[in-house]
Image (cartoon, rainbow, N blue to C red):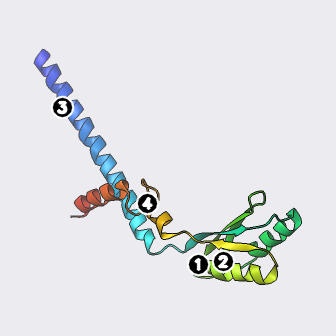
Amino acid sequence: MRVKKNKFLLWSIALLFLFTLSTLSFAIALYANRHADMAGKSSLQLSRIDFKETIDPVLAQSVKNSIAKTEGVNHVYFNESDGILVFSHDNRIQSADQIFENIQSNYDLNMERFVVSDEMAQGSCPVTGQHSILLKVGGFFYGLLVL
């Protein structure tokens, strides 16, 4: 009787482990595949403009409204205390440079567009970045599931 209980317990643990492993591998494969598919098709971009001088709230609201009315811009956030304006836009409709030049031509402000350097881009998020362990493991499981 004791041997049957031990055998049942061993099989239960083994099946639970296999079920957990298969569910986890399937979830990782789906996650990795979704990000791989979106990498070449993404058109939403975050851009940032740094203001080198303090801006009064009325002018800040005017700049924010001007960007928000631009075609292709989805959302605008202006951190007035730090002089940082962040906006999301569809880069198929408007580029960040076009939006920046539009603001620069309409307002006489000391500002510059923040551009991520190659060094900063290389140090992207280790979990969800382009070279992350999650995408590598997901690619492995995706390869197993597809074949």
Please report whichever mark, 3 or 2, sits nearer to the chain's N-terminal start: 3
Residue beneath label 3, please? 11
Residue at x-position 45% and y-position 60%:
123
Say the numbered circle drawn on residue 129. Answer: 4
Q: How far is disc 1 from disc 2 in space, using C-alphas?
A: 8 Å
Asked if residue 128 can be seen in this view, the reply is yes
Q: Position of residue 25 (x, y in %)?
A: 30, 51
Q: How far is disc 4 from disc 3 in space, using C-alphas?
A: 38 Å
Say the numbered circle drawn on residue 115. Answer: none
Q: Is the C-beta separation of discs 1 and 2 under 8 Å? A: yes
Place residue 108 in its image quadrant: bottom right
Place residue 91 in its image quadrant: bottom right
Residue beneath label 2, please? 72
Q: Is the C-beta separation of discs 4 and 3 under 8 Å? A: no
- Element at badge 1? loop
Foreground label between 1 and 2? 1
Quarter holding the N terminus is top left
- Element at badge 3? helix
The type of residue carrying mark 1 is Asn
Q: Is residue 134 left or right of residue 47?
A: left
Say the numbered circle drawn on residue 91. Answer: 1
Q: Residues within 10 Å of mark 2 (few under 14, many from 20)?
A: some
The type of residue carrying mark 4 is Gly
Residue at x-position 45% and y-position 69%:
38
Q: Residues within 10 Å of mark 3 (few under 14, many from 20)?
A: few
Q: Position of residue 107 (x, y in %)?
A: 81, 78
The type of residue carrying mark 2 is Gly
